[in-house]
Image (spheres, helix red, strand yellow):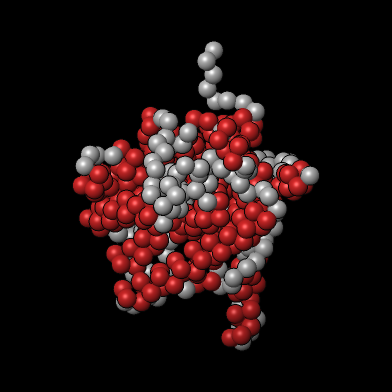
Amino acid sequence: MLKQLALSSVLLVLVCLTTAPTQLLADDAATPPTTVETTATEAPPAADETQEVTDEAEANAEFVWTDKHEFDYTINTLIMFICAVLVLFMQAGFAMVEVGLNSQKNTVNILFKNVMDLCIGSLLFLVLGYGLMYPGGDYAGKWFGFGSSFVTRDAQANDDGGWDTPPNVNDDGDATWSSSADFLFQVAFAATAATIVSGAVAGRMHFIGYLVYSAILTGLIYPISGMWKWGGGIAGAENFQDFAGSIVVHAVGGFAGLAGALLLGPRIGRFTADGKSKPMPGHNLTFAALGVFILWVGWYGFNPGSQLTYAGATNAETTVYIGLTTTFSAAAGAISAMILGWVLFGKPDLTMALNGALAGLVGITANCDRVSQPESIIIGAIAGILVVLAIIALEKLCIDDPVGAFPVHGVCGVWGGLATGIFGDLPDGVETQGAFFMIQLKWTVIICLWAFLTMFAVFSALKAIGLLRVTEEDEMQGLDFSEHGMAAYTMS
């Protein structure tokens, strides 16, 4: 009965809006903005009256949609849509990494979780999460707020073939991008944060319990902390910098995964009675390597895509430069992890190198727009060392994280946030590197604690009602059969 109640509480069946880029054509582009005329015989108005007339004229002025607006809006929208697709494709990468590094008897369960992260997350983010993350200007500098559910179309065509309202334009009068493209980009980030946890709890968690967790993270936990930085909230107001989400996305997922791993306990046979580690190798390193390559490619949507505005030479150059620093950091992370693993274990370990590449990608995500090329290499190299040491530390503590989700996303996410304060160019309003680092440290701690404590409470509640860990018999049989009644591999 508890399973049925839990399942019905999270499977919300809603229809997502779809939209296409739109444009505004003024009724008469040649008509100048409305002005207030005066005659030579009239006495000039007083100074305050002049200001009132000017304000009224500006308020009544007709906005003229130009060819430049149309071009910028089109470029920004289409590139953002492509970047959103790249980030969504990262779901396949996460699935392959997790499948490859785990037992084949849990393959169906792992694939199913990754699919549901995206499906449940998309609908809950549409109804609840998006409004929490982007509540609007009324909540600027605050901790919480809510805008509205669903995506508002940028413009609607009228019977004359024009547009009743202009597409998105910022305060400077420049065209931005489609609200629909923005939602697709943001929901892909939400799904990423949720999927990180899947690897940390693999092989021993109830499927229904996982659905409950995924719904809460994507609909509530991630959007609130995302609002603090990206939705005009308190962290952004204090100049906290996290360009594409080392902290807001990756550390949130990593610390949520740590909470789950702690409460679940290790897989059967993972550690001996006296606490010694017993390796449980994954069944397909080909899948794991393929998954890392997919994630690396997807990261070119994740990091460069976070530039958001791509039209114009400056934006185009910045977007590609971000791809450059992202590449160098990933490469340095893989190399440093390989070398350290080689020194420690006597032979080069493929899984360490793969996690090192991901560590470098996570570490550069917060600062890819504001560090130099040599600094990006240093950040990636340190991330590669940290991920190896963190994997070893978890084993010493008898914490079972089958894919290294916390070392990669939690530890290296924290490193990315702090590295921003160490190496990154100072944001406006911050005078010293020391002050910048303290801002980064403060909000890194706050956001990580938010994710860990809230999800620890969620996993504790699931454990209390019997929806967290499967039985020993089911775990030994494999979750593919015990939870889904099917197998990923057959002999036919």
**95 relative position to 210: left or right:** left
Which residue is depicted at the point 73% across and 44% down?
A: 3
Front residue of 154 and 393: 393
Outermost residue, front side = 273
Q: If the image is split into quadrants, where does the C terminus sit?
A: top right
Front residue of 242 and 111: 111
Which residue is depicted at the point 53% across and 46% down?
A: 201
Mark count: 0
Give the quadrant of residue 43. bottom right
Residue 203 in view here:
yes
Front residue of 227 and 339: 339
Is 152 drawn above or below residue 33 in the view shown?
A: above
**350 relative position to 55: left or right:** left
Give the quadrant of residue 483. top right
Front residue of 278 and 60: 278
Q: If the image is split into quadrants, where does the N terminus sit?
A: top right
Residue 415: where, in percent of width, then height? 36, 60
Which residue is depicted at the point 66% across and 53% down?
A: 462
Residue 363: where, in percent of width, then height? 36, 55
Residue 34 in view here:
no
Residue 151: where, in percent of width, then height? 66, 50
Which residue is depicted at the point 56% across and 64% down?
A: 453
Residue 452: where, in percent of width, then height? 53, 61
